Structures are given as structure tokens and as C-alpha cells.
Amino acid sequence: MRLSRYFLPVLKETPREAQIVSHRYMLQAGMIKQASAGIYSWLPLGFKVLRKIEEIVHQEQQRAGHIPMLMPTLQSADLWRESGRYDAYGPEMLRIRDRQDRDMLYGPTNEEMITDIFRSYVTSYKDLPLTLYHIQWKFRDEMRPRFGVMRGREFLMKDGYNFDLTKEDALHAYNRHLVSYLRTYERMGLQAIPMRADSGPIGGDDTHEFLVLAETGESEVFYDGEITDLKFGDRAIDFDDHAACAAVLEEFTSRYARTDETHDEALFNQIPEERRRTARGIEVGQIFYFGTKYSDAMGALVDDGKGGKVPVHMGSHGIGVSRLLGAIIEASHDDKGIIWPEGVTPFHCGIVNLKQGDAEADAACEAIYDSLTALGLEPLYDDRDERAGAKFGTMDMIGLPWRITVGPRGLKNGVVELTSRRTGESEELPPADAVARIAKIYQGIA
């Protein structure tokens, strides 16, 4: 993409309404525009990153054997009355009526709807286990929407729901989701720590939240410092292997890590003092096992193979897709702007032409652009007739991990400059070598 043809409304001034880094940089980098309190339009750059994050979530869900679908944003209140949650959910739920005077709601979550779908089609244990998921926009009418996409009213979320014959099978689904989530977050350059949490209005006794440590986090967290040394890496996990998934869960949850809602001071004090940590955390996902809460209430029964009918055991598993974008910025930035991890960057590399209109510099930039594109990469070529400082400022703000700088002086020596956004380190290389280096960096990131 050539920047002269792209829509990138970068702001020079710091937005007054932005209280945290991610909100400020998303506005300044031209990624979002507020439509109303807690509701945003996603401009091209922000939408591009959002889709990158969404695609990683899709890939890891399907790697774990989960089946994608799509449910509507508007739901019938009758389903929620069946489960008993319509009146219990509270004012965060947006309740509306259609022209036939039927009670409807803008879905904050989908347990009732997925249970209705399941009971309509599945009647035998032979169709289990089953995990369905979708990525859909949600709405929760926050009393005080703030912090941009971190606490908005409208947000993009992945909901997954497992259906199993027994509690043992459902707990394996729980473990499988935990493993899948660890891989998902690491691919985005994040370390998300699973912490024992409160289930809230979803219900159930078994639940973990995944939190990214950041100063602006809404939750106070308490944890054993050893947990930050754990990495999922490139483990080859068979998601059908109950023991392997349980072992990963044990490894990542055996050390103390809890939110303020479930914190136990006595247990925390049993950790050696030098390893006790307190911090702030941003919730980016949560997994639940809630047994037969919804299947009992809504009659989601299956033939158990022994002549009887039993309610299925269920769990739900959420990832805040749009919130993740803000969390990544909170965890990866400096005073110049965003620093995107390679796995989610909107463009793989920036190309800066220091002397637009110079025949040699223009030709070299075009050749680099074409070479990167031919390799399946997406460069962003700043071909504007602007000062070098303005071009560097834009590249720093939008946070592309790598930048190739092309100018007449370097080309006389047969080199361009390759710069890492994260470290600031630069290296002079022949143009073909710079392209090869970028290609090697992104090789295997998928």
C-alpha cells in the first residue's frame, strides 16, 4: 500500500479525552473514531489489526477442533426468561422492543441462544463432544465507558461453548481451551496469565481469567513471580490427549495467581516473600465450566446410551478480540507510539523514501516494494512529498516493526537502512539483503 493512496488520519495533537496510552495512540494513529460514548468506528489501520487478531483466534480455535458459526446480535428475551437471567442480568443489558412489541435484547453473551440451537438438533450422546464458537459484536451498557476499546459498550468477542456428556469430558474441554488460549496470546506477542477468578453472571465454580500485566489494568492481581517465566512456545499438543492438556493446565495454574475478587491473603503469604507480586492486569479472556446450569433450565437433554436422558455438561470460553488490540498497545509501546508485535502488525514493513522525486530513490523504493509484495508480504510505502522527520514520526506512531529507509546518499554506496522499531537499532544493507532479512523474520509466523 502506498501511503499517498491510503486513508490514515494521523493526529498531531494529543486527544484530551484519552486517559490511557492505548486510547491516545489509537486516536493519534488514526485507528478509531468515537461515534458515541463507548462506541467506535474502526478506521482502515485499526480495522486491519482487528482482522489480524480475529484471524489468529479463528486459527487457534479450529486447531483445537472447535467449529465456527455465527449467531445474531439481537436475541429474543424469551430465551433469557427461560434460563432465569433476563431480570437478573442487570442494567448493562440493552433491552428493546420490535415493532410487534416483542421484547428483544442486544446480546451481551450467548449461552441461551447456543443452548437453544443445541437442543433443537442434538439428541444423542453419539454427537458429543461438541464445541461451537463464533466471533460477534456484543453490547453491554457500561455505566462509565472509558479507556477507548478497553472498556467500551460495543465490542468484538469470541464466544465458545462446549457440550459434553459427563463432567469429566467437560473439564477436558476446559483444559483444552486453556491450552488453546495460551498459544493464541503468545502468537500476538502477549503473556496472558491464567488466574483463578469469579464467574459473575455467567455462573459455575470453575473459571480462569487471562490477564495481561499493565499499569492501566482495571484489576488488581496477586501472583507468584515464577509464573512470568513460563512460556508455551511451540509445543505440539494433541488436543484429544486428556493427560497432555491437563498437564499444561497444572503447569500454568499450580502457582498462585488470582484477581482481587478471589484473592486469599493466607495462601498468598505462603509464597516466599521475594516471589510475591502485586500488579494491575487487563482481562483479555475467560473460560468457564458451569455444568448443567443452562441445559437443566432449558431442557438440553441427550440420550445417554443406557435408555435414559440426561442434561449435557457445558462450558463457555470468551476472548475479547477488540479489547486485545488495546491490551497489546498497553503492553508494547514507547513515548513515540505503538510497537506492534510481528504477529499482528497491520503492515509487515514500512518503506521511507527520503527524497521523493529523485529518480534513483524512487526506483529503489519501487523495487523494494515490488519484491516484498511478490513474497506475499504487505509493505507500507511512504511516498508522500513530506519532510523526513514527518515520515519517521508517522512510522514511529503507527508502530510497524521494521522500516527500510531509502535515500540518495545510501544508494551511492549500494545500501539502504533497516531499522527495528522495538530496539531502534539500524543496519545498512544492500536492498536485496534487506528484503531477504524481512522475509526471513516473517517466515513461519502464522
Image (tube, rainbow, N blue to C red):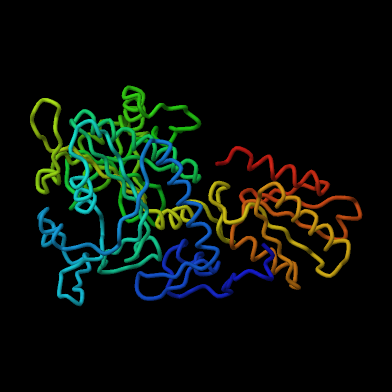
Residue 356: quarter of image: bottom right
Residue positioned 17% across, 47% down in the render: 203
Q: In the image, 332: left or right of 204?
A: right
Residue visible at 25% across and 54% down in the picture = 110
* Residue in front for this viewpoint, 253 or 294: 294
Q: Quadrant of the C terminus?
A: top right
Provide residue 37's location: percent of width, then percent of height.
Answer: 34, 73
Front residue of this view, candidates 36 and 307:
307
Instruction: List x then y, in percent, for residue 318.
Output: 32, 48
Instruction: Give the quarter of the figure containing the N terminus.
Output: bottom right
Q: Height in image: 119 above or below 91? A: above
Would you identify the image quadrant in which residue 403 lies?
bottom right
Residue placed furthest toward the top: 243
Res. 281 visible in picture: no
Q: In percent of the image, x 64 and y 65: which residue is there? A: 394
Q: Indicate whether 282 appears above or below 442.
A: below
Q: Position of residue 149 (x, y in %)?
A: 40, 63
Residue 424 in view, yes or no: yes
Q: Is residue 107 left or right of residue 103?
A: right
